[in-house]
Amino acid sequence: MRPVSIFGLSVITLSFDDAAEDYFGLALSSVLFLIWTYTTFIALRTQNPELASRLEFVVDILLSLALTCMVISGLVLVYAVW
């Protein structure tokens, strides 16, 4: 990866020689956020209170996993650039 500074903002450009492993965490967190969004929507729309309670627990776990995965992949990318 090659960092480029534009107006004081650090922008990371992607190239073909970058390792796919660096971006696996970002891809995984994106999928987790997508599943989290659908699960939240279903939990809000369901008429069954028991199902809604279970889905709320799943939503909490998915959000925690997605945020953790995003932070870890961000730290890996920063370490690779630094």
Image: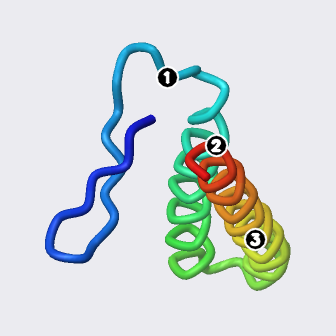
Query: Mark 3 — residue?
Result: 55
What amino acid type should be assigned to the residue bearing mark 2? Ala
Q: Report x, y in % for residue 44.
A: 55, 81
Q: Earlier in the sequence, mark 2 or mark 1?
A: 1
On the rendered structure, is 36 left or right of 4? right
Question: What is the C-alpha distance between the residues marked 3 and 2?
Answer: 37 Å
Question: What is the C-alpha distance between the residues marked 2 and 1?
Answer: 10 Å
Q: How many residues crowd mark 2 within 10 Å: few (<14), some (14–19), many (20+)?
A: few
What amino acid type should be assigned to the residue bearing mark 3? Leu
7 and 64: which is toward the camera: 7
Question: What is the C-alpha distance between the residues marked 1 and 3?
Answer: 38 Å
Outermost residue, left side? 7
Residue 80, numbered circle: 2
73 and 52: which is toward the camera: 73
Q: Identify which residue is drawn at 83% across, 69% down.
A: 61
Q: Identify which residue is drawn at 51% across, 54% down.
A: 34
Q: Earlier in the sequence, mark 3 or mark 2?
A: 3
On the rendered structure, is 39 left or right of 62? left
What amino acid type should be assigned to the residue bearing mark 1? Asp
Residue 81 higher or lower than 48, as above or below: above
Q: How many residues crowd mark 3 within 10 Å: few (<14), some (14–19), many (20+)?
A: many
| Front label number (1 vs 3) | 1
Q: Report x, y in % for residue 22.
A: 62, 34
Q: Are marks 3 and 2 in contact (CB under 8 Å)?
A: no
Residue 9 higher or lower than 18, as above or below: below
Residue 1, numbered circle: none
Residue 77 higher or lower than 44, as above or below: above
Residue 18, numbered circle: 1
Q: Quadrant of residue 48?
A: bottom right
Q: Identify which residue is drawn at 49% across, 22% down.
A: 18
Q: What SS does tag 2 mark?
A: helix
Q: How many residues crowd mark 1 within 10 Å: few (<14), some (14–19), many (20+)?
A: few
